[in-house]
Amino acid sequence: MKLFFIWTILGAIAFSDINVMTSKQNRLISVSKEELANLYLGKIDTIKGIKAIPVDNKENYREFYQKVLKKTPEQLRAYWMREIHEGKRVPPKKMSSSEIKQAMSRNTNIIAYASESSNAKVLLTLK
């Protein structure tokens, strides 16, 4: 019985929704998974003509990249090592949820993700 309860809790945590969000002052209304993938891989820096600054959430990092790119943190590390070595791109900055909330209040171009929306505009919910 205890094992069943633990697996139920872990399953709920592992499959929680992730909200992709930005400042309420940002003009973006929505974002696609493809746009997110390109933004978080450093391939684009605008979405629908609007400047976008991706920020990684330390708490939901693994789950976000699994849902958007189907990649593990190890695979992402290898990707970024190549990009940095070749002088092409740098990875998004990693912040805690509270740091993201503060940064978003200072810069309306930030796009981040979390399991809660924390009074921000939700652009997409990843199931």
Image (spheres, grey):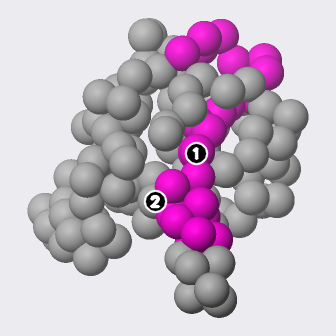
Taking 47 as reference, is 6 left or right?
right
Residue to which mark 2 is pinned: 63
What kind of residue is marked 1? Answer: Ile
What kind of residue is marked 2? Answer: Glu
Residue at image point 64% right, 71% down: 9
Quick one: SS at disc 2?
A: helix
Report if the CB atoms under discs 1 and 2 are less than 8 Å apart: yes
State which region is magenta: 8-30
- Count of all numbered marks drawn on residues in the image: 2
Taking 20 as reference, is 66 left or right?
left
Residue 80 can be seen, yes or no: no
Percent across and percent down for residue 56 are 54, 56
Taking 122 as reference, is 87 left or right?
left
Residue to which mark 1 is pinned: 18
- Where 110 falls versus 34 (above or below)? below
Q: Indicate which disc residue 116 carries.
A: none
First in sequence, mark 1 or 2: give its number: 1
